[in-house]
Amino acid sequence: MDWVAEVVGAGATKAEVVGQNGLRFDLRVVVPEAYGNVLQHFTGSKQHNIGLREDAVKQGLSVSEYGVTSVETGEIVSVASEEELYELLGYAYVPPELREGSGELEAARSGSLPQLIELGDLRGDLHVHSTWSDGRASIEEMALAAIERGYEFMAITDHGDRLREGRLELQLEEIEALNARLAPFHILSGVESAIRADGSMDLPDEELARLDWVFGALHTAFERSPTERILGAMDNPHVDCIAHPTARRIGQREPQVAIERVVARAVETETALEMNGQPDRLDLRDVHARLAGEAGAKIVISSDGHRTVTLMSIELGLAQARRAWLTSEQVLNTRPWERILRAKKKS
């Protein structure tokens, strides 16, 4: 195929190639009756599969991509699905996102795996931009796209520095008019307010107090006390959530944010933390989101959509949330918008 740069190996039932982008790809062909064995083998991480095989040895079994072999009799059992394989070995089914060697096998053995959040659990998106700032679609266009996705609500959170000099008032009037037309769908009034280098927000408190939903976010001066600035923003009674809390750009920027301190203050102040689905952010990342979830912090999964098509980025945030062992109960935007407003910290 055109995207293959190098064929490393090829045979009757397997092939290995390197793509033009440098990634390595494996192809395996098996009979349907052994599909579950080979799928699990190549889907689990190395750590997960080592743990699975070590446990199997204690039961007198040998697990491979071809089947489960009884060491005593030599009998090989193949299965058509991963669910059958985990059941055969004495586990509840382990979703692929959890196969990281981080306690999932013990939980599967004891029946204590979480019921992971699913896409259908999300009732709305709390981080959406429009042409009022750097978005590429109007509020109405974003709202109609959200309705197409089956949402009940959407928060318009344009950048604070673009809503000064009376523009916020005009935007609120537009949102009110659209809500009258689009009901029962509801557009929440919001903002993504930058946390300046001196720790202040880029909109005054009296403006933030008027809004349904307020993000605080680092956008500049990432080397200047990022942790302290985030902690200060969470102390602001009008800041409901910290957007992309570590401010990372994958492969480009990794600010030194003390995530443990951020999570602790989030719990203390009842400030939510965002899992941003933009492909170059994925922030919070999975391990940080698991830390936040276990600490009892409120979590929001958002698209940070700047055009209608990028509303789908929320699905990448959801995938990270599943890797973080999160359930729907731990995520704010699985609730009706009225309950979200009641769950906000008191200003």
Image (cartoon, rainbow, N blue to C red):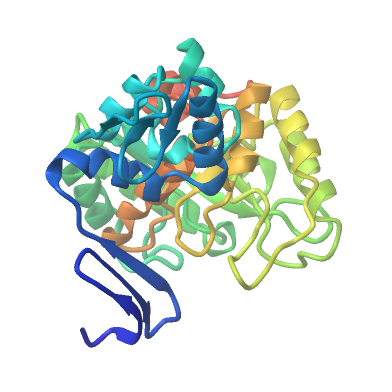
Q: Position of residue 193 (x, y in %)?
A: 61, 52
Residue at 45 percent across and 65 percent down: it is 133
Screen quadrant of the N terminus: bottom left
Residue at 64 percent across and 24 percent down: it is 294
Above or below 226: residue 60: above
Q: Position of residue 270 (x, y in %)?
A: 66, 24
Residue at 60 percent across and 65 percent down: it is 249
Left or right: where does residue 324 sit relative to residue 44?
right
* Badge count: 0
Q: Position of residue 56 (x, y in %)?
A: 48, 27
Left or right: where does residue 51 sit relative to residue 7?
right
Residue nearest the observer in this picture, 50 or 338: 50
Above or below 191: residue 268: above
* Rendering quarter of residue 292: top right
Outermost residue toward the left in this view: 32
Residue nearest the observer in this picture, 247 or 28: 28
Q: Position of residue 169 (x, y in %)?
A: 46, 50
Q: Is residue 241 visible?
A: no
Residue nearest the observer in this picture, 229 or 101: 101
Q: Is residue 130 visible?
A: yes
Outermost residue toward the front in this view: 73
* Rendering quarter of residue 3: bottom left
Residue at 44 percent across and 40 percent down: it is 97
Screen quadrant of the C terminus: top right
Left or right: where does residue 83 sit relative to residue 52?
left
